[in-house]
Image (tube, rainbow, N blue to C red):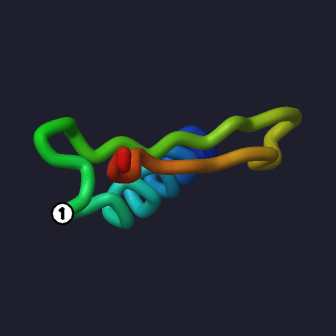
Amino acid sequence: MTTDEKFMYRCLQLAQKGEGFARPNPMVGAVIVHNGQIIGEGYHRQFA
């Protein structure tokens, strides 16, 4: 698995945390990477 694939896999893991809460929007996970290290991450949550 390449480094980019590892970061993408982490995005998918994060997106799963929004399952059942993000509708009708898609589940989205994101990472911010600097010099090969994740310095931020998040996922789409329900808006109240």
Residue type beneath disc 1: Gly
Which residue, as the protein is rendered here, is positioned at the far left?
A: 24
Percent coordinates x, y for residue 47 in the rendering: 36, 45
Pointer 1 local density, CA inside 10 Å: few below 14, some 14–19, many at least 20: few
Question: Residue 19's image quarter?
Answer: bottom left
Is any atom of residue 1 visible in this view?
A: no
Q: Is residue 9 left or right of residue 23?
A: right
Please name the residue shown 74% across and 37% down the image.
33
Please name the residue shown 39% across and 51% down the image.
45
Residue situated in front as seen by the camera: 39 or 25? 25
Which residue, as the protein is rendered here, is positioned at the far right?
A: 35
Please name the residue shown 25% across and 58% down the image.
21
Please name the residue shown 32% across and 62% down the image.
16
Question: Residue 3's image quarter?
Answer: top right
Residue situated in front as seen by the camera: 46 or 12? 46
Q: Is residue 37 left or right of residue 17?
A: right
- Residue 21 drawn above or below residue 26: below
Residue situated in front as seen by the camera: 5 or 32? 32
- Residue 34 drawn above or below residue 43: above
Residue situated in front as seen by the camera: 26 or 7? 26
Percent coordinates x, y for residue 25 in the rendering: 19, 36
Q: Disc 1 designates what residue?
A: 20
